[in-house]
Amino acid sequence: MNLPLTGHIYVQVAPEQIRKTLSDDGWSSFDFGPLRVQIPSGDLTRIRGARVLARTIAAQADFWDKDLAALEEVLTAAEQTATAQPTPAAEPAPSEDAELDAKVAAFMQTPETHRRGHRGGQ
């Protein structure tokens, strides 16, 4: 038995709005936000159809959870990379030439945008 939806319904749904109930008056219900699937407990054909629907919902929810877990992993890694503190640049090893050490230290303090190199005759 098919229980198709015939349109798109955009609503906000919170976890506490997803529940199943078995009422004293013989109805089994599944609520998903404002949507309700309700089956009389004495209708074997509808119960079988509802079970197919329940298994399909469970399988799709599991697939979606796995997709979301993969997305969460990617975004968490990106967030950790973005918030990681840069490691300070290693200090150059001191040489035996104090004047050269002073020039290197001054060069390292200059912002990269203001550094001029002499590469290839430039």
Image (tube, rainbow, N blue to C red):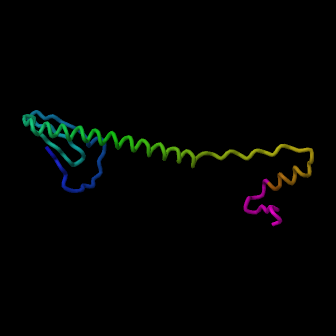
**Side of 92 relative to 23 (left or right):** right
What residue occupies the far bottom of the structure in this picture?
Answer: 122
Up-down: is 54 above or below 34? above
Q: Position of residue 80 (x, y in %)?
A: 55, 44
**Side of 80 relative to 28 (left or right):** right
Up-down: is 47 above or below 7? above
Q: Between residues 86 and 61, which one lies in front from this camera angle?
A: 61
**Side of 115 relative to 71 (left or right):** right
Up-down: is 31 above or below 42? below
Q: Between residues 102 and 55, which one lies in front from this camera angle?
A: 55
Q: Between residues 60 and 30, which one lies in front from this camera angle?
A: 60
**Side of 78 relative to 45 (left or right):** right
Q: Position of residue 113 (x, y in %)?
A: 73, 62
Q: Residue at x 24, y 47 (%)?
A: 33
The quarter holding residue 65 reads: top left
Q: Main secondary structure of the magenta part?
A: loop
Q: Residue at x 44, y 43 (%)?
A: 70
Q: Residue at x 39, y 44 (%)?
A: 67
Q: Position of residue 116 (x, y in %)?
A: 79, 63
Up-down: is 120 above or below 103? below
Q: Split into 4 quadrants, where in the image is the N terminus?
A: top left
The quarter holding residue 10 reads: bottom left
Q: Split into 4 quadrants, where in the image is the C terminus?
A: bottom right
Residue 87 forms part of the magenta stretch: no
Q: Which residues are magenta?
A: 108-122
Question: How many marks are shown on the rendered structure?
Answer: 0
Residue 112 forms part of the magenta stretch: yes
Q: Position of residue 108 (x, y in %)?
A: 79, 53
